[in-house]
Amino acid sequence: MELAVIDIGGTSIKFARWDGTTLQDRHAAGTPADLEGFYALLTTEVAHMKARGPLAGVAISSPGAVNQATGVIEGASALPYIHNFEIVPELERRFGLKVAIENDANCAALAEVDTGAAAGKSRVAVLVLGTGVGGAIIADGHVEHGHHLLGGEFGYMMQNGRTLSEQGTAVSVGKAYREASGENVSGKDVFDRADDGDKLAVELTEALYQSLAEAIFNLQYSYDPELFLVGGGISRNPALLPGIRRHIEQVMAYVKIADVTPQVESCKYLEAANLMGAIANFKQRYAD
């Protein structure tokens, strides 16, 4: 099965051709400012791929709450022009091919369950740490979207009057450090300073680990997955998993009745996660 694969982002759109084994000719273009420019870019790219050989369809990763039943991207994102109309039928008409679209965080999770760090697992929760905390819940290899398409929106979880997105990301840590110190630093800078023993940086990074550990513990004792995966740029930091695990052990020591310790690992896929997950979603929808 050969596919055109597209990952829609707010600033750039990634393209690749799936030859059945690997992603070929990966490249990106700037995200157009309007819907007509968007259609023109995607149609041109897909036409170029079709010219190189037959395609079974187009697999797309997108921001927003994708309603697979209606072909509508609900919710909101940095690209308001893709939302709240039947975009899948329109793309199929323009491409002359089957189209499958899934939310980008859900795609990242599907990639991990299909051929990544959670391959072979039945129940998995994936937390994607970016500007906020997104993610997905996977059961028996499929995304659990939820009644309102809110499955995996972990960033809305409340902890001590604040959302997890407000305290569980490198972005939030950088913001807190700037507010406390007046220095213009990034989240990465804060983690680097914590490694060097900076008191404020250590305090803020430990608070981040605690927030994520508590969220993971709560999900373990509500959804009860076999495995948690953590993704996003921060997942490359070698201090992240040990920090989360250390604080999970502290939570376990406090909740003495709890006897299942959450198992937490890093995602396998990074830049290619959304593309690989879009392929997995297409296969689920059409391969049978």
Image: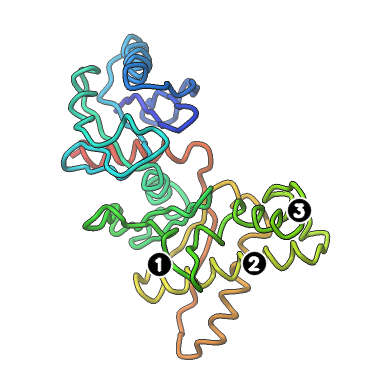
Q: Earlier in the sequence, mark 1 or mark 3?
A: 3
Query: Neighbour class for label 3 at 10 Å: few (<14), some, many (≥20)?
Result: few
Q: Residue at x 76, y 57 (%)?
A: 181
Query: Neighbour class for label 2 at 10 Å: few (<14), some, many (≥20)?
Result: some
Residue type at mark 2? Gly
> Going by the image, does 104 lie left or right of 11?
left
Mark 1 sits on what residue?
226
Q: Nearer the viewer, residue 88 or 163?
A: 163
Q: Earlier in the sequence, mark 2 or mark 1?
A: 1
Q: Earlier in the sequence, mark 2 or mark 3?
A: 3
Residue type at mark 1? Glu
Of all residues, the one furthest to the bottom in this rendering is: 257
Query: Which image quadrant: the C terminus?
Result: top left
**Residue 182 numbered tag:** 3
- SS class of the residue under badge 1? loop
Q: Position of residue 225 (x, y in %)?
A: 38, 67
Closer to us: mark 2 or mark 1?
2
Q: Position of residue 204 (x, y in %)?
A: 68, 64
Q: Nearer the viewer, residue 283 or 105?
A: 105
Closer to us: mark 2 or mark 3?
3
Mark 2 sits on what residue?
243
Q: Residue at x 38, y 41 (%)?
A: 277
Query: Which image quadrant: the N terminus?
Result: top left
Contact check, label 2 and label 3, Cβ < 8 Å: no
Quote the CA–CA distance across marks 1 and 3: 42 Å
